[in-house]
Structure formats: structure tokens, C-alpha cells
Image: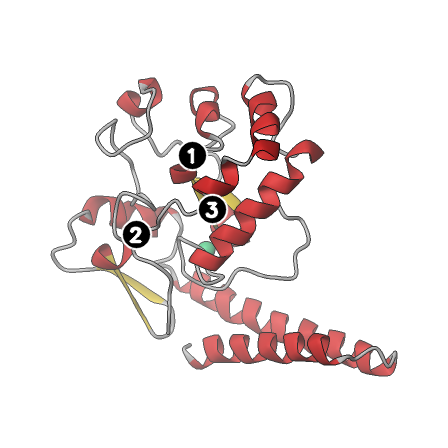
Amino acid sequence: MNLGPGRMSPTHRSALRRKRCQKAIRAYRHGKIQWADKQLAGVRMDLRKSLRAQQVGRCYFCRQLVDQERRNACEDIEHYLDKSKPHYRKWAFSPVNLTMACHPCNMQKGNRDLGDQAMRESQSLRPGSGSFKWLHPYFDDFHLNIEIHPGWVYAVKPNAPRAAEATAMLCDLELDQIKRIQKTAQRYHDLIARAVVLMNKLIQRNEIDRPRMKWVTAFIASINEELRWM
Ligand SMILES: [Zn+2]
């Protein structure tokens, strides 16, 4: 199963450089608008598409599928260094500070500060500018440090180059706990149930056209594949 890249690449850099994005990003940096402002809707959508493609629809942290039904395009873009902290606001649109995360990981991460004092004082977001409490999506390799076994059982690899950071990440996100595994199974079952309800509705309303049917059946098949892995 393709669990997404070990080390991410900032492929969305070009989207952020577009003229129409630059104006809104400048307004954000100057504190004139907030992240959720509609002026940034296009930027958020571009980012989401790019991150989703690179991460094969999976959360960077737990590598499980991110719910595709949610319409709120800004919700699952994750700022590794929390943009609500004044010292990290400057990196809200830094390509290497952005990933896509599922709702449970996003909630579990909360607003914790993953940088150290050097990072807080740094003007550039680069490896060596400071240190990070968890694996970094762009500077560390996830698969060199963490292995995921069928059943969504997570372990730090023997001889992991960033064992401390990998351990902290799994612990803080509670990926090492059985309750998280149970929640995953429940979430996937719920997703299938919702997809089946949607399909029935479409059939009843006679709205089932070929692309929509294809999308729903592909969605159910992908969730089934995840469940087979449990
Ligand atoms: Zn996750």
C-alpha cells in the first residue's frame, strides 16, 4: 500500500508564487486579513490540491486517508510550526511549513510548539535553523524513522536516525495507543456507511450519472482496501 512520501518536496512553491496569490499572502503577512479570509480561498484550494496529490490523499502524520467529503478547504492544511504563534506567523505560507493532516491528528497536535528557542528566533525555516520536537515533513524521512504494520500499528524503526523525534511524535499523537486503532476502524466503517447512504439517495433521485457513480464506488473501494489492512 502506498503510504505517501518519506520526505516531502515543496512542489506547491510555484502555486504560492502566482501573482493572484501573492497579493493576498502579503495582506496576511501585514496582519490585514486572517487565514480564513475569503481572499485566501484560492491559495488554500491550490495548496490543498497540491498537498493531497503529493500525500496520495493521506495525513502526513498517521498516513491514513483524509476524509474527502469535507467541504471546508482550509481545515486540513496543517502548519507544522503553528501559525497562531506570533513568532511563526511569518511562515504561514512557507512551503516547507505546510502539510495535510487528518482531523484526529490535527486535534491531537493542537497548538503545541514544535520548534525550540533557536527556531522561534530564526528568520529562516531551514534544517539547522533550530531543532524540532517531531519529525519534520520536509527535512526528515518518515519511513526511515517509523514503520507502520498492518492493523495501523506504529513503531519507531531500529536505528532510526531521529528516534527521539519519532517517539515523541507517535506518543503525542497517541498513535501508539489501542484506542486510536479502534477509532480508525470506526471512522472507516462510518465513512462506508455514509457513502452507501449517499449512493442510495442518488439512486432514489435518479441522479446517478456515470462520473458520480464512479467516484462513489472508487471511494468505497479505497476505504475497503484500508479496512482489509486492519
Ligand atoms: Zn492523521
The residue labelled by disc 3 is 108
Amino acid at pointer 3: Gln
Q: How many labels, in total? A: 3
Frontmost of labels 3 and 2 is: 2
Query: In the rendered image, which residue does mark 1 sit on?
Result: 112
62, above or below 25, in the image: below
Tell me which residue sits at (31%, 20%) in the image. Answer: 122
Q: Looking at numbered disc 1 in the image, what kind of residue is underneath it?
A: Arg
- SS at mark 3 in the image: helix
Picture residue at 49% right of the left edge, 39% below the top: 110
User: Label 1 CB, ligand 1: below 8 Å?
Assistant: no
Establish if 112 lies above or below 217. Answer: above
Disc 3 from disc 2: Cα separation: 22 Å
Q: How many angstroms separate mark 1 from mark 2 (CA)? A: 22 Å
Q: Which residue is mark 2?
A: 7
Binning the other alpha carbons within 10 Å of mark 2 as few (below 14), some (14 to 19) or many (20 upward) gives some
- Residue located 52% across and 80% down the image: 224
Give the x, y percent position of residue 25. 56, 28
Report crowding for label 1: few under 14, some 14 to 19, many 20 or more residues within 10 A (C-alpha): few
In terms of depth relative to the viewer, which is nearer, 51 or 135?
51
- Helix, strand or loop at label 1? It is loop
Any part of residue 194 in sight: yes
Q: Quadrant of the N terminus?
A: bottom left
Residue 175 position in % (x across, y down): 38, 57
Q: Quadrant of the C terminus?
A: bottom left
Above or below 23: residue 207: below
